[in-house]
Image (tube, rainbow, N blue to C red):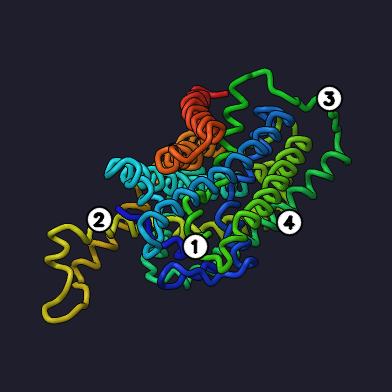
Amino acid sequence: MEIPDAGASLPLLKSSAGGGGRASALQTLGNIIVSIVGTGILGLPYAFRVAGWFAGSLGVVIVGIATYYCMLLLIQCRDKLESDEGPEETKTYGDLGFKCMGKTGRYLTETLIFAAQCGGSIAYLVFIGRNMSSIFKSYGISMVSFIFMLVPIEIALSWVGSLSALSPFSIFADICNIIAMCFVVKENVEQVFGGDFSFSDRKAIASNVGGIPFAGGMAVFCFEGFAMTLALESSMRDKQEFPKLLAKVLTGITFVYVLFGFCGYMAYGDQTMDIITLNLPKNWSAIAVQIGLCVGLTFTFPIMVHPLNEIIEQKLKRTEWFQKHQYTDGTHSTTKLCRCVVYLTRTILVVGLATVASFVPGFGSFASLVGSTLCALISFVLPASFHLTLLGPSLNLWNKGLDVFIVLSGLVFAVYGTYNTIVGV
């Protein structure tokens, strides 16, 4: 299977034939933010509650630095392949896996990306279900009920052929995210200065050691969009400026993450919920923010699952049965039977994701689990492994040692973080 064009989910991404990018620095900046910042940020205050405000802040900073470094490793690996084999084809993450580990590497890389995309889509459904059930708590409608209420809507939206029709909703969701963050910060400040606040009650480092890897998993989940690195760099007109631009953007995002997590935990302390919007007062403005977030994510969900649909359909179209029945005689028009099969696979995917989401016990624990396993492997272990394999002979001892350290640390973090998330912190 192949990962589809990343530009499908980024309205500002401009790709061109021959691999030449046409996106300006401002457009690339916007795409980096859209790729990385998601609903995970609203779970950071809870991660700070679990780990402590100092440990949580330090964890986010470390993850931000490691993310930047490993993104550059991925670009160096792609540049190495292009210098050896020619620049006629832009290498994907899966191509790097194939070059380093053969078919096993390709399937491992793309399976992890596929699973991580599924995890992000499930997190969307859980987020919507938790928020909507809290708003309509007096009516006794559960999170699971709201998730399955969304299924017919998401199935219909997943049948939309053109993502350009849905891209305005993605921008709307990003605007809602920004408004929600500002509103939450305002409420946090009012809570701190207007409530019974005591800084001594806020832990700097949690006594439970398992809280630190839990918060680390949440932080890794918040720096999502790692698989977009190569597409983002390729889309930029002046590629030499990409590392500097990426450093500035990730520095800003890391600062916002730390500030947001710190303020949320300071405001609510041990009462901080796994989604900070659940701590908001039940007035009309807070409810409007929550509903706006949920509506935006409802229409963004089809964009999240679009790469999954393309991967599944690419595999489907390679089957002998599909190729036999794909076109009507004498034309290149897809038969109704094949279109129905495609719609059926999209329906099954949405129902499957909703079913898994209905069993998720909480947004925070699920996000940390995805971050500790899938995202950690994609973001740290694989890039450092590829870098050692492709550029190992030319690396100095320091760079080799750093790559080995990242690989080992990523694997230990994945195992230990997963254990703590499942057992409970």
How far apart are the two marked residues, 3 and 2, measured between alpha carbons? 57 Å
Precedes in sequence: disc 3 or disc 4: 3
Query: In the figure, 191 relative to 81: above or below?
Result: above
Disc 1 crowd rating (10 Å Cα; few below 14, some 14-19, many 20+) is: many
How far apart are the two marked residues, 1 and 3, measured between alpha carbons? 49 Å
Whole-percent x, y for residue 162 in the image: 41, 71
Residue at the spot 61% in from the left edge and 25% down from the top edge: 211
As helix, strand or loop, the secondary structure at mark 4 comes to: helix
Residue at the spot 24% in from the left edge and 65% down from the top edge: 340
Numbered circle sitting on residue 285: 4
How far apart are the two marked residues, 4 and 2, measured between alpha carbons? 46 Å
Mark 3 — residue? 200
Residue type, numbered disc 1: Ser
Whole-percent x, y for residue 80 in the image: 44, 51
As helix, strand or loop, the secondary structure at mark 3 comes to: helix
**Residue 146 visible:** no
- Residues under numbered marks 1 and 2 in contact, where contact means CB atoms less than 8 Å apart: no
